Image: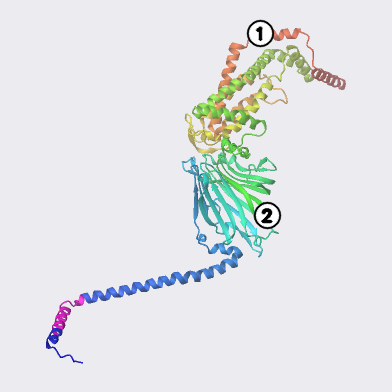
Amino acid sequence: MEEKQFDPKSLIGYVLIFAIAAYYIYTNRPTPEELEAEKQKQEQVASAKAVQVNEAAAEVSLPAAVDSLGKVAAYQKLGAFGYSQTLASANGGETLLENEVLSLKINNKGGYISEAKLKNFKTYDANPVYLIKDGKNANLSIDFSTADNRVLSTKDLFFEPKLTKVAGGNQQLSMRLKVANDKFLEYVYVLKPNDYMLDFSIRSQGLESVFDSSKSIDLNWELEAFRHAKSNTYENRYTEVVFEYEDGRDDYTGQGDFKEEEAEDVTYVAFKQHFFSSVLLTDKAFKTGKFTSTNLIKDEAIDTLKLKKFTAQMPLALNAGNLNYQMNWYYGPTDYKILKSYDRNLDEIVALGWGIFGWINKIIFIPLFSLLGGFLPYGLAIIFMTVLVKIGLSPVTYKSYVSQARMKVLKPEITELNEKYADNPMKKQQETMKLYGKAGVSPMSGCIPALLQMPILYALFSFFPSAIALRQKGFLWADDLSSYDKIFDLPFTIPFYGDHVSLFPILASIAIFFYMQMTTGQNMPTQQQPGMPNMKFIMYLSPLFMLFFFNNYPSGLSLYYFISNLITIGIMLVIKNYIIDEDKIHAQIQENKKKPKKQSKFKKRLQEAMEQAEKQQKSKK
């Protein structure tokens, strides 16, 4: 094999390449400043990598350590429900359910509604109307015992939320209190568009071995009612617990510092705040219910934020070891039409009066006022309704005034009898009754028409304080027909009157005074009979009572009474001056006296009894 020979040219080439490379490296070497910058850069990169490694290690190891300790503590305290404390929902939070009229927030802790706002209403000072706010004035809790002898309350536990949209634009929120992924206690809320009523269900799955079925499971609901109106005392008068029980019967706790009621087979309970209500309804009746109402207003000037505290306690029954209840929530106005539309007897929450008075309001005044309010301002609607009511009662008014006119004609003769038999009350009574009988006059004929008007007057007395349509509707100087009108404030408070002056009650009192002057005043006896009430005192007392009593009542009610008495005075003046002729009445009475009058059996017996009593009195003498 031939060996390669040394080539001098190759050597020279290698030397030249080496020399060029050495020159290039020398001329492009970094300066000392560049070397220092590079060194710092490398140190920063290394430091950042170290931090990333440490953070990654923390993310992997720290939660494992915390979870481990947390789980042990949670299970020791809560038993099977300790699982719920280890989920992400245990960090808290709220879920929003909202439609056109209602805004609700449901808190993970407790799974209950922590905020309920009515979008279309404002308080007297123009703030939003909250029935529940910040979870501070209300709570709902299921209190139960577990098989491992723990007593727990859902208000202290965390639910896992899941919000979905369902058919028809409904929003459905599932809140699950878990003991395992497939074992839980669940609240389900369904909010429909443009509706104050929610579907609400309570059910459990797989908790047969968790609940202690030998002990009571109680649903506890609490709420402190916020003030929404100008007068907290007046609003508090219509704030109470209303409940339905035993197949449609309803009752309420009433007023007082503390009230308590119990009932069986309860189908709904309402915490009523005058014009707004929170209601829990159930399809399957609660076996019993216990309700309390505690007055929170001790001093009207100091206690200005809340009215009453309500509580309701109902037992829940297990079915095959689990809970299953279909319910509803209502958060909305105490509006008769809205409540009536649900066909759940909720219209009984509205205080329209009992018995016939409530029926008069439901059948006559609510439809009539709705009709008038549909095309008239509410102040004018009250006036027009008053006119229609007075026209309807005008026949009764006419008969009442005719009776008064007849009594006025007989007044001289009655006075003569009083003087003639002043020392013999029994004989005076007999002769007076004979005079009435001959003249064809009954002293009761003036009372009966007045009694016939009483159901109408009382029904209206209940109607106006409950008419939410009047809320924050102004008329003349009154800015809210559902509350008192005010022309100026007083620098002090008058007991039973208040710290302000309302004008409509003053006008109504003046009208009542003149009305009584025209009726009672005309027939008032000059001398007061022993044992009889002082009619003159009553005539002056009634307007004064009106002035004091109505100063804090709705201006719409005072407006009605003012217009009503004004119209009555006008009708009576027309009857007196253009319809009734007192001379003709006197002539007719004199003719009646001449005619033989057949007594009724009752009058005959009454006269015989009086004559017998007179004989006995004479025999004793």
* Principal secondary structure, stretch drawn in magenta: helix
Quarter of the figure with the C terminus: top right
Q: Position of residue 596 (x, y in %)?
A: 78, 9
Crowd around label 1: few <14 · some 14–19 · many ≥20 (10 Å): few
Crowd around label 2: few <14 · some 14–19 · many ≥20 (10 Å): few
What residue range appears in magenta? 15-33
Quarter of the figure with the N terminus: bottom left
Looking at the rendered structure, which numbered label has been put on residue 67?
none
Q: Is residue 531 above or below residue 71?
A: above
- Judging by the rendered image, the residue that carries numbered circle 1 is 584
Q: Horizontally, is 53 left or right of 323 in the view? A: left
Amino acid under disc 1: Lys
Looking at the image, the residue that sits furthest to the right is 619
- Is residue 537 at least partly visible in the picture? no
Looking at the rendered structure, which numbered label has been put on residue 319?
2
Residue 587 is drawn in which quadrant?
A: top right
In reply to whether residue 417 is colored magenta, the answer given is: no
